[in-house]
Image (cartoon, rainbow, N blue to C red):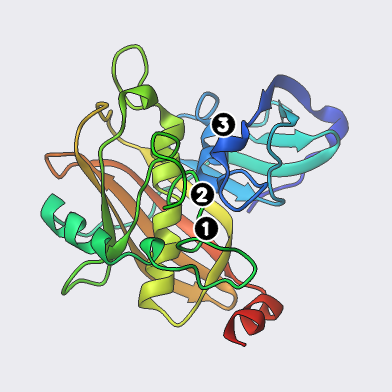
């Protein structure tokens, strides 16, 4: 369990500002991208609890009290808490790249949005990870769709050179981003729920991924506990090896929004 830390004991490690292009929903940072902010401080599995939406284009602070927990804060308000975690997620066999290509063609990311209060395509038309309406070159364009005959969604992804470091390896923030949205698509397509908000992401990067390498992102439902909806996700390289995996906790869309969509 996460333990709250007294703010007076926290030391500021650095300031961060998340540019608006890394949004998920409008005016809110993509959850996977935000979770990656702690990769510099936590090695191995990172357990991230999202308490509040992360604002864009605003200076925030990463703080710690030295006990192994880290916080993203907006002034005195805790937005996110992260700590070393334990990965307990079995990953199914990787779908082939061809299966992922076929699945993506029918992705709900490419269909007219189900929302009445926005226009465009998909769950979040302008999301940096899955948005179909993001201009070319400004998003990952990961569009998960159902894999025929399997209880999962998948999408192909070839990370652009701009997402790599000086050695040509994809930077952690983009791997974490790729592991975020597909879980919501798995729940949306394969359960009777409509996930609305990412609450927790337990993730781990297991090996490097080269920029320009064709890979596959897959996700599948794991279960639920009341309002908590669980989904697993994995990123596979061209050899079918696991690059990273994540277990996400999603919460259903608020009832008032669901009713609005159904009317």
Image: 176 above or below 66 = below
Residue 254 screen position, x and y as percent: 67, 74
Image: 221 above or below 126 = below
Mark closer to the observer (3, 2): 2
Image: 56 above or below 87 = above
Side (left or right) of 262 relative to 89: right
Residue 117 screen position, x and y as percent: 65, 68
Crowdedness of circle 1 by 10 Å Cα count: few (<14), some, many (20+)?
Answer: many
Side (left or right) of 197 relative to 238: right
Label 1's element?
loop
Q: Quadrant of the C terminus?
A: bottom right
Side (left or right) of 9 relative to 153: right
Task: Name the foreground residue: 198 vs 43.
Answer: 198
Occupied quadrant, residue 149? bottom left
Side (left or right) of 227 relative to 181: right
Occupied quadrant, residue 22? top right
Which residue was labeled with disc 2? 127
Label 3's element?
helix
Q: Label 1, label 3: how many angstroms apart (C-alpha)?
A: 22 Å
Residue 50 screen position, x and y as percent: 64, 50
Label 2's element?
loop
Q: Label 3, label 2: how many angstroms apart (C-alpha)?
A: 18 Å
Which residue was labeled with disc 3? 37
Q: Residue at x 65, y 84 (%)?
A: 259
Crowdedness of circle 3 by 10 Å Cα count: few (<14), some, many (20+)?
Answer: some
N-term-proximal mark, 3 vs 2: 3
Which residue was labeled with disc 1? 124
Task: Name the foreground residue: 220 vs 65.
Answer: 220
Mark closer to the observer (1, 3): 1
Check if mark 1's residue and mark 2's residue have beta carbons within 8 Å.
Answer: yes
Q: Residue at x 58, y 43 (%)?
A: 23
Q: Label 1, label 2: how many angstroms apart (C-alpha)?
A: 5 Å
């Amino acid at each position: 369990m996460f333990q709250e830390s007294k703010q007076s004991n926290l030391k500021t490690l650095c300031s961060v500002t998340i540019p608006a292009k890394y949004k998920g929903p409008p005016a809110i940072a993509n959850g996977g991208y935000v979770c990656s902010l702690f990769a510099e401080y936590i090695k191995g599995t990172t357990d991230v609890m999202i308490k509040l939406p992360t604002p864009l284009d605003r200076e925030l602070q990463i703080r710690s009290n030295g006990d192994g927990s880290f916080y993203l804060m907006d002034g005195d308000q805790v937005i996110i808490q992260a700590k070393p975690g334990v990965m307990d997620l079995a990953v199914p066999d990787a779908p082939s790249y061809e299966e992922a290509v076929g699945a993506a063609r029918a992705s709900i990311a490419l269909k007219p949005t189900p929302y009445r209060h926005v226009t465009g395509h998909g769950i979040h038309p302008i999301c940096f990870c899955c948005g179909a309406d993001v201009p070319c070159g400004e998003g990952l364009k990961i569009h998960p769709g159902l894999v025929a005959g399997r209880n999962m969604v998948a999408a192909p992804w070839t990370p652009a050179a701009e997402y790599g470091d000086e050695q040509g390896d994809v930077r952690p923030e983009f791997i974490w981003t790729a592991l975020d949205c597909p879980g919501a698509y798995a729940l949306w397509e394969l359960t009777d729920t409509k996930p609305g908000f990412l609450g927790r992401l337990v993730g781990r990067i297991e090996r490097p991924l080269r920029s320009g390498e064709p890979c596959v992102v897959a996700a599948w439902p794991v279960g639920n506990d009341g309002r908590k909806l669980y989904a697993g996700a994995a990123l596979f390289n061209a050899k079918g090896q696991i690059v990273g995996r994540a277990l996400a906790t999603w919460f259903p869309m608020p009832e008032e929004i669901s009713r609005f969509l159904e009317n």
